[in-house]
Amino acid sequence: MRKCKLLIALVTVCLFVVIAGSAFGADMPKYELKFSTAATPMEPQTKGFMKFAEIIEELTGGNIKVTIYHSGQLADQKTQVLGTMRGDIDMCDGSPSWYADLVPYPEIGVLEAAYVFKSLDHLYAVVNGPIGKEYWDELRKRSGMVVLDTWFLGTRELNLTKKAGVVKKPADLKGVKLRMPGSEAWMDVGRGLGAQPTPLGFNEVYMALKTGTIDGQDNPLPTDFSSKFYEVTHYIVLTDHQMTIINPTINEKLWNSMPEDYKVYMKKALLIGRNLCNQLVLEQEAKLLAQFQNEFGMEIIIPDKVAFMENTKKVYVKNEKIWGEGVYEKIQNESANVYEAQ
């Protein structure tokens, strides 16, 4: 009797293996995808992308293999978005500020405007809700790219050299050369903060800070740490001016070629990658201020955040014609009822 039960169990296992194997058998299409990012290996998003690549290969029995080209190996931030639009690159991590200039789709730039989001809950209520859906659908029509997910990279703070000096309000940034990614939406962020925005590729920032070509940059604390900007700067100014997001994005023709089950698995694998990325970001943000101050001797400055918010609104008045009247405020108020302890 035991031998019979054992035989049945073995047959059941074999049948499962055969069925699973047939689901991703020789007749199923195979994909070898190139994913481009300017992020370095130690950054949370790169670790998330690597996890995504691992999971999608497991879920599809090796039929989808994704190679992550980090640190701009394949293309810089601008070129990778254009390459994904054309289909020269399969996937990349784009963001609304790049889509605004490169598609072009200027209206979507509002999703990376300074102080547009109040919290992470607010951010996801917008980008994964009806407002976000309209933007992502329109982006697909205009660009031939499909946004598959939204990941959180942290809250951007000012990171300045000693030359820039102590900054507590927008007037203190007058004449300070603040690095910004090379798009108009990003340049407006720099202007809103009161600085002299200076366009520069991410992979050039460290040396530019070291040589004095720029006086500062803005990024989330985990990026400051992984890129070792603490070696060439002195101040962290907690402006909390932007909640940074990236979008794992795929060429539309490639996406349309995939079987529906592959699409489901891609989304599942990206969700696992997102959760890893977001967790690492939140953990690092909670710990890094003390490390920057105690281990690296940086000065942490608490600025007049209200002054920065008011200055930003003045700069954004001109963008009403681009984003649509009242859109900035509509997004700010989308999750007004999200609970926050007072």
Image (cartoon, grey):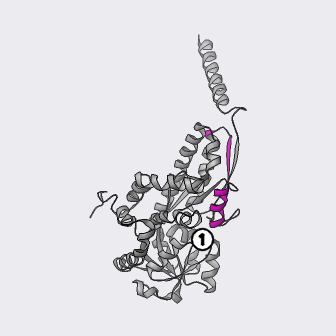
Q: Residue at x 48, y 62 (%)?
A: 108
Q: Is residue 113 visible?
A: no
Does the stretch in magenta take in 23? no
Compared with 276, 265 (above or below) is above
Horizontal relation, residue 328 to residue 36: left or right: left
- Residue under the image location 62 percent in, 25 percent down: 16
| Rendered location of residue 124, percent (x, y) | 42, 55
Tell me the quarter of the image containing the C terminus: bottom left
Q: Nearer the viewer, residue 295 or 116?
A: 116
Q: Position of residue 297 (x, y in %)?
A: 50, 81
Q: Which residue: 45% across, 83% down?
A: 194
Callout 1 secondary element: loop
| Magenta-highlighted residues | 59-88
Identity of the residue furthest to the top in this view? 1
- Residue 104 x %, y %: 56, 64
| Residue on which the image places disc 1 | 227
Q: Quarter of the image containing the N terminus?
A: top right
Q: Residue 214: image x %, image y %?
A: 58, 83
113 or 211, which is in the foreground? Answer: 113
Tag 1: amino acid: Ser
